[in-house]
Image (spheres, coloured by chain):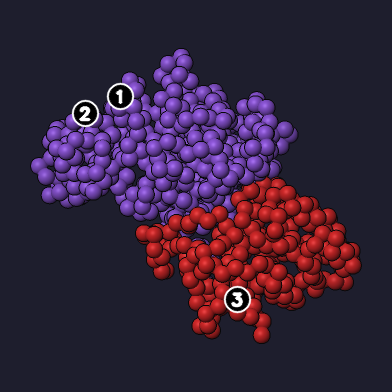
Chain colours: A purple, B red
Amino acid sequence: MDEEYDAIVLGTGLKECIISGMLSVSGKKVLHVDRNKYYGGESASICPLEELFTKFGANAPDESYGRGRDWNVDLIPKFLMANGSLVKLLIHTGVTRYLEFKSVEGSYVFKGGKIAKVPVDQKEALASDLMGMFEKRRFRNFLTYVQDFMQDDPKTWKDFDPTTQNMTALYEKFGLDKNTQDFTGHALALYRDDDYLNRPALDTITRIKLYSDSLAKYGKSPYLYPMYGLGELPQGFARLSAIYGGTYMLDKPIDEIVLGEGGRAVGVRSGNEIAKCKQIYCDPTYVPDRVRKKGKVIRCICLLDHPISNTKDALSTQIIIPQKQVGRNSDIYVSLVSHTHQVAAKGWFIGMVSTTVETDNPENEIKPGLDLLGPVRQKFVSVSDYYEPIDDGLQSQIFISQSYDATSHFESTCLDVLDIFKRGTGEEFDFSKIKRDLDLEEQ
Amino acid sequence: MEHTEPHSTEPEMANRQGAAQRPNGAQGKICQFKLVLLGESAVGKSSLVLRFVKGQFHEYQESTIGAAFLTQTVCLDDTTVKFEIWDTAGQERYHSLAPMYYRGAQAAIVVYDITNQDTFGRAKTWVKELQRQASPTIVIALAGNKQDLANKRMVEYEEAQTYAEENGLLFMETSAKTALNVNDIFLAIAKKLPKYDQNQGQSGQGQGRRLAEGDQGAKTPGNCCK
């Protein structure tokens, strides 16, 4: 450990592993350390099942749960958008070679006490029971507009300026009612609240296009999920970093960040060893005095021995409960994965309900989501603080990621990573740096 | 006749269940297997792979080979066995190999250096680790590498052979430098692996799909990850 590195990365959560990979690929000498003896930190998938029960202080699972080793339970539920930034990062970096994915079977939205399939194309819009007949036509026209929309071709904007006019104005242009606005903004554009209505429409249009482009990729839903759980993602990026020379140490407690002149980080100390470096990249848990609380997220892991009702027995699904449907300010997300993803023993399902905490009784807040799941065999609830760094890290050269938010996908994760990389290195990540070496294996 | 084919492999397939061409054009079974290398640093893991895949040997091989994994095919009668070979990328050094490394591995070569008794002791630990972490049906081969340095031998052939027999491992002494037994050990593994035809839609992996750029659910030849 007593060496000098360009960068030391602390924590092996997904964000830190992506950053580590990007730094190594860019030719930096990287030391990547985790205090835990496993990869993934908060983004690990817990295996075996016994460990999950222990973690939450529950009695050991009985034999009906099958082999504990067959379980890989995520602590933070998310899906990948098939055409989203994380998939692009995976493909460009070649990390996709270490992973296998399955399409999530269904995407649903909650309306008037029950769930309905999210309509995404003209055909589905016309068949959907979310809207009346005339509304269906208006929604179809809106979808056509979004699909034909091209940001660099103002002709496709059709007398509407999405860079200045807000989303409410666009909804009004097509005469969409509040209900349709609700599932469009929350189940297609995937906003957690209604702030987007007053912002320029361009971002919403882009998000809806991402949803439909993602859907076009693999079919049934716009979402992908990796075999063996989300914990495979940080491991894949860690391997990328290692292949480009990154050094890995697990089970290594960090006792101190060593500061030099002007409060700049110059190394980290573990016991009597000091590793020197020019920069540090880490998650909030390694620097509690350099982050502030921004809010709380509640996540509830539910082990089920049945699929969710009214989803055609889907082995994986996502259900979005838009805030207004249940009188809230932020949406509730319900996700389901199962034995088909090698994350549960045969016949078992893992449901997750999560949302941003708004009251003093967060468990009560997720009740609408839990009700959709039906009988739950075992429930584990966690309420986590959500942290963000107090500064941009330029002075201290300590670049800190934000905690994982309540969003149902990885788009904000990637934005944070790309932003940290840019702050840390002063440049955008150059994807072309990877190609040459990837060609090697195909000689 | 059995022989290894040092030809280049086709571009990575977008979907594991795609069809591949046999070198001689005949229609036979094609099986793909994930093979992982284990062993202490500097016992010659990467050198064995480079010898097998490219027929090369470098006296001062760098400690990582800078590739996600290498592929090489072996032909056995009517079956083409394609190995997807994973190197540790140095993650073994501080015992930081990820579970992903073992995931879905159908074969493993545990390497030690015959001139270094410690590496043989560590090899036994790796075998235990495989028995704990990997699939119960994994085929494990033990390779006593650096056989060209037999005059500095510290691990007796018989000792390793006995250990291998007791634990149901294939065993050979190899030399990446002289190529001794390098092809043979991969071939012996290929023979021992269960062959089912990939075209029948079976695979030892998790039955998911890999992603590739421009992937529309169909294979896009030569357009992967570029």
Task: Give me the C-alpha separation between circle 1 and circle 3.
Answer: 60 Å
Q: Chain of mark 1?
A: A
Query: Residues at marks 1 and 3, common chain?
Result: no
Check disc 1 and give the amino acid type.
Answer: Lys
User: Marks 3 and 1: in contact by CB < 8 Å?
Assistant: no
B90 sits left or right of A379 in the view:
right
**Most foreground residue, A384 or B94:** A384
Residue that appears at 48% across and 39% down: A307
Check disc 2 and give the amino acid type.
Answer: Lys
Q: Secondary structure at mark 2?
A: helix
The picture quadrant where one finds residue A79 is top left
List the residue tagged with mark 1: A324
Residue that appears at 49% across and 65% down: B17
**Most foreground residue, A374 or A163:** A374
Q: Return the x and y of residue B65 as percentages of the image width and height.
A: 61, 62
Check disc 3 and give the amino acid type.
Answer: Thr
List the residue tagged with mark 2: A178
Task: Give me the C-alpha separation between circle 1 and circle 2.
Answer: 10 Å
Query: Residues at marks 2 and 3, common chain?
Result: no
Dot 3 crowding, Cα within 10 Å, few <14, some 14–19, many 20+: some
Dot 1 crowding, Cα within 10 Å, few <14, some 14–19, many 20+: some
> How many numbered circles are shown?
3
List the residue tagged with mark 3: B79
Q: Chain of mark 3?
A: B
Q: Return the x and y of residue B26 as percentages of the image width and height.
A: 53, 83
User: Marks 2 and 1: in contact by CB < 8 Å?
Assistant: yes
Against A171, is B10 above or below? below
Q: Return the x and y of residue A226 as percentages of the image width and height.
A: 50, 48
Residue A8 can be seen, yes or no = no
Task: Give me the C-alpha separation between circle 2 and circle 3.
Answer: 62 Å
Residue A325 can be seen, yes or no = yes
Q: Secondary structure at mark 3?
A: strand
